[in-house]
Amino acid sequence: MSGVTAERRAASTKRPRRIARTFALLGVFAAAAIVVLAVVVTRESGATLSADSAGLAHLQLQPLAGTLSEARAFGPDGQAIPLRLSQNVLMPLSTLTPGEQVTVDVVIRRPGALGWALGSTRTERLTVRAPVAQITSRWETVSGGAPVTVSFAQPVAAVAYRSDGRTTRLTLPQPQSVVTLGHFLAAGTVSVAAAARPWERLGKRTAVTWFPASALPVAVVNPAPGSTLTPAQAIRLTFSRPVVDVLGTDRPPLPSGTQGTWRTIDSHTLLFHPTGLGAPLGSQLRLALSAPVMVTGPSGTAAQTTRAISWTVPLGTTLRLHQLLAQAGYLPLDWTASGAPVANTPIAQTAAAVDPPAGTFTWRYPNTPPELKALWNADNANAITKGAVMMFENEHGLAVDGLAGPAVWAALLHNTIIGGRHTGVYNYVYVHRNIPQKLTLWSGGHVVLTSPGNTGVPAAPTQLGTFQVFEHIPVGTMSGTNPDGSSYNDPGIKWISYFNGGDALHSFNRASFGTPQSLGCVELPLASAAKVWPYTPIGTLVTIEN
């Protein structure tokens, strides 16, 4: 009996233990099931927002994720961007700028049970930038007859290019990475803008240059070689190969007198930027290259192999010469600009030299002699012009020839910029050759002196016309040939102002004055000659008339 009782007691002890293990196993299985269920729910309720190759963003919802409740987009300034959902792609309904940063928020409403457990909604955020269409090659070689094409780093939806002041827009039926612009001249440059997406504005313009095929490097030069170049005009050299491969680190040396600097615009382009007065007016600007290059103008015409490029820099216009001489007090006229005056800067003054501003000339003095007025022409060089230039040259240490060449223009522009002005009044001498012959000295609006004088005898008459005093000496020796072939040599002649070859205003000892007695000069009594001489510096006009 005792053995049976012991077995029963052992069996009754094992049952609770088996039940406990069973419940433990059931707990483990339940926990595992919960974990699996959580994993499945997590995996199947996900929502992702990512960049899209066509739209602004792509929304991916798993089966248990729920439904899209709201989608919002904002620009960098916080301005709302309306959206449209199409096949899980969010498309902007307003036009964006390439490179513009956009923040996209989507709100997902979870299904009931999950919403109770995890919250009714979840929010996903994505920050993207509108794509930028990058041109992969800005310098292309185009064989004769082939069209110009532009390559991009990614397909683009629209392209616009500007040439000859006109913009052409191409809307592509399908995005393309290589776009054909069309047939153009042998060389040229267009500015190209593109949009990578249909919902973008066109991006920034980029210059694209093409070159004719050549074994040598090609340089497209603007302005064209051999053309006219204004002093303040920039020069652009665009090479088919990188500048360092063509010229190394050298830059074309500047001709003497030319002011400016070279700038590297990009790996293929050099820009000469004038400074100061730039290239001298009336000069040849010649740039020497360190290697032979095929050079052509912007249109690709007249291509030639050379190691030098030249342009002609024109002289300033006669009208502007008159304006500056008037402003500086070398003319018997004043000049007033119709609009704002030209700025006293080198760039402004050199630009005005070739493109003068509008304005009005007025006579400076009352009672201006009609003989002097008759000489004036604002648009054409005349006797007044030559006299003023000679006076300016003499006062500024230049060779006196009355011609407004490069040296005169450079000095005149400098004088204008610093506000220099001739301080004297305007003087004019006119001589009546009819008997009784007399000289009249006019200065600053007044007749200073009228004196009898002697002009040339019939065998050596004083030439009619208007001349400029070119030599001015207080005393000298006058020599020459008499009408009969003999020579004369008269020392000690006082108050000499040469105006036409050997003809001069000067004193001479005569018994009478007022009749032809000289050998072409205008002889005056000593007192009259002494008074006239200070008024006849180099450049003073002398008119001989009947």
Image (cartoon, rainbow, N blue to C red):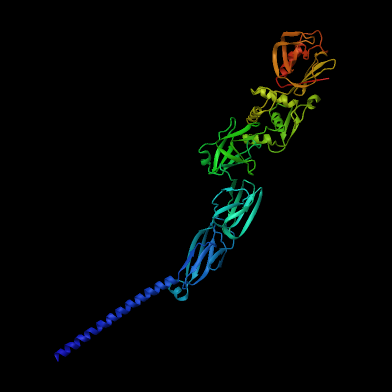
Relative placement, left or right, of 181 versus 114 is: right
- Quarter of the figure with residue 77: bottom right
| Figure label count | 0
Q: Position of residue 192 (x, y in %)?
A: 60, 51
Q: Position of residue 301 (x, y in %)?
A: 64, 42
Q: Position of residue 191 (x, y in %)?
A: 61, 49
Q: 234 above or below 160? A: above
Which residue ends up furthest to the right in the rendered image? 435
> Residue at left 43%, top 73%?
117
Q: Nearer the viewer, residue 140 or 458?
A: 140
Q: Position of residue 453 (x, y in %)?
A: 80, 14
Q: Quadrant of the N terminus?
A: bottom left
- Quarter of the figure with residue 479: top right
Q: Nearer the viewer, residue 412 or 105?
A: 412
Q: Quadrant of the C terminus?
A: top right
Relative placement, left or right, of 495 versus 55 is: right
> Residue at left 50%, top 62%?
51
Q: 336 above or below 512? A: below
Whether residue 276 can be seen here: no
Q: Nearer the viewer, residue 93 or 216?
A: 216
> Residue at left 79%, top 16%?
462
Q: 281 above or below 460? A: below
Which residue ends up furthest to the bottom in the rendered image? 1
Q: Nearer the viewer, residue 182 or 406?
A: 182
Relative placement, left or right, of 25 versus 363 is: left
> Residue at left 82%, top 17%?
433
Whether residue 255 can be seen here: yes
Relative placement, left or right, of 404 versus 55 is: right
